[in-house]
């Protein structure tokens, strides 16, 4: 199963790109990351665009949506950590925190976006 990279995202490297590596002959400057992304997703944006040739707007839109999904998953995780994996419903019954599904779906969207761009998180092991 693919896992979301941990640690500093700017240090994460991906394998099997479908886009060529950016080289010193390429003069186009990578666009700045969208302002609404988290600081770690902005670093990941810069790292990916520095290393890979994603110069077309379609690829950059996919990258933006991918990183938005990553941020959403992280926000869900923080709230789940705060509130717990079980919550009490209006009848006083314990049930799974609804954010668990949102986190799962956001992580799946993040990984799907990486695959769509041809970037795969290297497996550890």
Image (spheres, grey):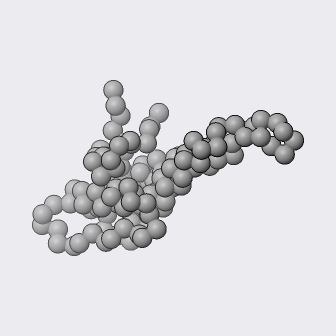
| Image-based side of 13 in relation to 80, left or right | left
Task: Where is residue 56? Give x, y as percent.
Answer: 34, 70
Q: Which residue lies furthest to the front in this view?
A: 82
Q: Residue at x 42, y 70 (%)?
A: 35
- For the question of whether residue 112 can be seen, the reply is no
Task: Where is residue 19? Give x, y as percent.
Answer: 29, 57
| Image-based side of 103 in relation to 46, left or right | right
**93 or 35: which is nearer to us?**
93
Task: Where is residue 108? Give x, y as percent.
Answer: 53, 46
Q: Residue furthest left?
A: 25
Q: Which residue lies furthest to the right in this view?
A: 91
Q: Which residue is drawn at 23% across and 72% down?
A: 29
Q: Quadrant of the C terminus?
A: top left
Task: Where is residue 119? Give x, y as percent.
Answer: 35, 49
**Relative to 93, residue 36 above or below:** below
Q: Residue at x 30, y 61 (%)?
A: 46
| Image-based side of 29 in relation to 114, left or right | left
């Amino acid at each position: 199963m693919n896992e979301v990279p941990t640690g500093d995202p700017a240090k994460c490297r991906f394998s099997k790109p479908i886009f060529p590596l950016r080289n010193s002959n390429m003069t186009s400057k990578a666009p700045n990351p969208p302002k609404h992304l988290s600081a770690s997703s902005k670093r990941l944006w810069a790292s990916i665009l520095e290393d890979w040739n994603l110069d077309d707007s379609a690829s950059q839109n996919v990258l933006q949506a991918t990183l938005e999904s990553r941020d959403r998953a992280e926000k869900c995780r923080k709230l789940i950590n705060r509130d717990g994996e079980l919550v009490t419903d209006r009848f006083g019954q314990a049930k799974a925190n609804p954010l668990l599904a949102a986190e799962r779906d956001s992580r799946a969207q993040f990984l799907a976006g990486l695959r769509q761009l041809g970037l795969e998180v290297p497996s550890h092991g």
